[in-house]
Image: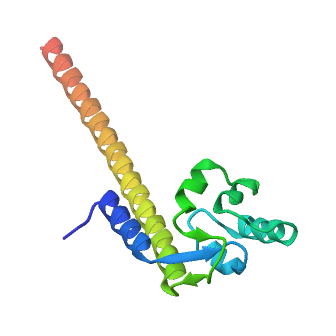
Amino acid sequence: MKLSFKSTLLSLALLATQAFAVINLNTATKDELMSLNGIGESKAEAIIEYRKANKFNSIEDIKNISGIGDKTYENLKDDISVSGKTTVQPKVKEIKDKSAKKTKELKEDINNKTGKTKDNASKKGSEIKDIKSSAKDKVKEKAKEEISK
């Protein structure tokens, strides 16, 4: 059974959201911060730099980090805290990486199929032009034969 691109992405997204994790902004390591959706290396480093000078008193304080606005906050708010222990299941990063890899593979597959389709269409177009040209030549030959009779 083949899954469509959208259904595969949806399945991977659902799988990733089922992995429960709560990241304490005041104590999390760079890798733990990077396990959050939308937080890469530079934002994780910015969070760590921010907390050296400021304690996160509420999860909304994350919006003080450059590049983290309302949209990112809305995506993160269920996965972050400012107290308690950071709990990250070891599989979260692995699932995130697998999801990104699968997405990349699916995009490449689609691009390859699109490219092949374009190539096939181009070949068919050339074949049609050749057939038309050949047909025109035959019509001209027949016309010449009829005229010379």
Position of residue 93 relative to residue 10, above or below, is below
Structure colour scheme = rainbow
Name the spot of residue 133 as percent of width and height, x first: 29, 30
Q: Quadrant of residue 65?
A: bottom right
Extreme right residue here? Answer: 53
Q: Closest to the observer: 127 or 148?
A: 127
Residue 55 in percent (x, y) is at 79, 68
Q: Residue at 87% across / 67% down in the picture?
A: 53
Q: Quadrant of the N terminus?
A: bottom left
Identify which residue, 147 or 37, lies in the foreground.
37
**Residue under the point 54% across and 69% down:** 79
Left or right of residue 141: residue 82: right
Asked if residue 89 lies left or right of residue 143, the reply is right
Residue 94 is situated, as x and y percent measured from the top left of the image, at 51, 82
Q: Residue furthest bottom?
A: 90
Residue 56 sits above or below residue 72 on the image = below
Residue 32 appears left or right of 117: right
Horizontal placement of 35 versus 50: left or right? Answer: left
Residue 90, given in percent of the width and then of the height, sits at: 52, 87
